[in-house]
Amino acid sequence: MLCQNEAGVLPGSEIFFNTVSPQTERLFYYVGCCGHYFCEYNYRIRRNYMDCLLLMLIEKGEMHLQYRGKSDCAHANDLVLLDGTFPQYYDTPNYVEFYWLHVSGVNSFELCDYLTRLAGGIVHHTANNPKAAKSIRSLVSQFSTGQCIHDAEQSKLLHSVLCDLMPESRLNSSEAVHPAQQAVKFIQDHLSENLSLKRIAAEVHISPPHLVRLFRAELQHSPHEYIIQVRMNRAKHLLKTTTLPIKTIAAEVGYGSESSFTGAFTERIGISPRKFRDLPLG
């Protein structure tokens, strides 16, 4: 439907509302309402609370935002994602065109918090934005044309948009590889070697403290904890899929002796490598 009587919103702007079932609220991501706005310089929103996420795609112009004590600016092709349970203020200094969606469901707040911490803010400038933008336009277009939007399809599109902001998605884009992901690849490629924090940080050209911060933000582990996890997973794979001696497997996963590997494996997994190898898979 056409949007009327909202300050700064120009003719031709549209807003749509969605009614969802209790089952959809429990199982899926979903849109509560959405719109396609054309606004002039006096468009401004000051909101203290809403029980959903706000997702915006800026098509033209720019949007100024104030959120949780920080100021930011979103330009054309940027995505904005914020948790509406915190106060927010945004306005435009000139003409702006943007799509917006109120998003709820499943773990949406947790995912928003993770992506915000990872990006260092609520404005996302990623190489995958065109892909996400296509999904956002498709969603709003379905409301605009009155198409029947199945809950699962709507949820899939929303989840796709959020996943496009993930570091793994950025890794597969034309954007420069994130240092933490470079470190992950280096660890996986050199698992049998001495992997000191200093060495890994030097390989990705950042300081050791910075690398620790990136790992905790992106992987929820320190580099040391991540290395142990990868070594244990690799060891379990070799124990179950090969007949290699324990001593050889220990060297393959970066331990200097069979005894040090056996001690580390037993402490982490709860049983010795030999007992683990003998356990049935089923």
Image (cartoon, rainbow, N blue to C red):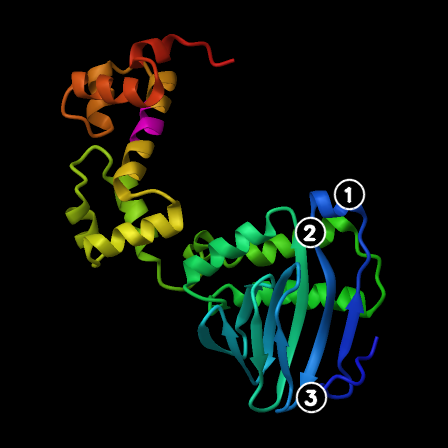
Mark linked to residue 8? 3
**Left/right of residue 10 with respect to residue 206 in the rendered view:** right
Q: Quadrant of residue 184?
A: top left
Q: Quadrant of residue 48?
A: bottom right
Mark linked to residue 194? none
Q: Inspect the image, locate mark 2, and give the three-letter code of the amino acid beneath it.
A: Ser
Camera-side mark, 2 or 3: 3
The magenta span reads 231-235
Instruction: Estimate the x, y position of residue 130 in percent, counting from the top left.
Output: 56, 68
Camera-side mark, 1 or 2: 1
Is residue 267 highlighted in magenta? no
> Measured along the vertical axis of the image, is residue 144 above or below residue 116?
below
Q: 4 or 229: nearer the eye?
A: 4
State the separation of the CA atoms marked 1 and 2: 13 Å
Instruction: Estimate the x, y position of residue 64 in percent, counting from the top left.
Output: 52, 81
Q: Which residue is mark 1?
A: 23
> Which residue is pictured at 68% across the width and 63% down the height?
102
Give the main secondary structure of the magenta stretch.
helix
> Measured along the vertical axis of the image, is residue 40 above or below residue 167?
below
Q: Which residue is mark 2?
A: 155
Q: Inspect the image, locate mark 1, and give the three-letter code of the amino acid beneath it.
A: Gln
Mark 3 or mark 1, earlier in chain: 3
Mark 2 or mark 3, earlier in chain: 3
Given contact means CB atoms under 8 Å apart, are the residues at marks 1 and 2 in contact? no
In the rendered image, the quadrant that contains the N terminus is bottom right
> Which residue is pictured at 57% across the width and 53% down the height?
109
Considering the numbered disc 2 on the image, is that residue within a helix, a strand or a loop?
Answer: helix
> Which residue is pictured at 69% across the width and 47% down the height?
28
> Measured along the vertical axis of the image, is residue 46 above or below residue 128?
below
Considering the numbered disc 3 on the image, is that residue within a helix, a strand or a loop?
Answer: loop
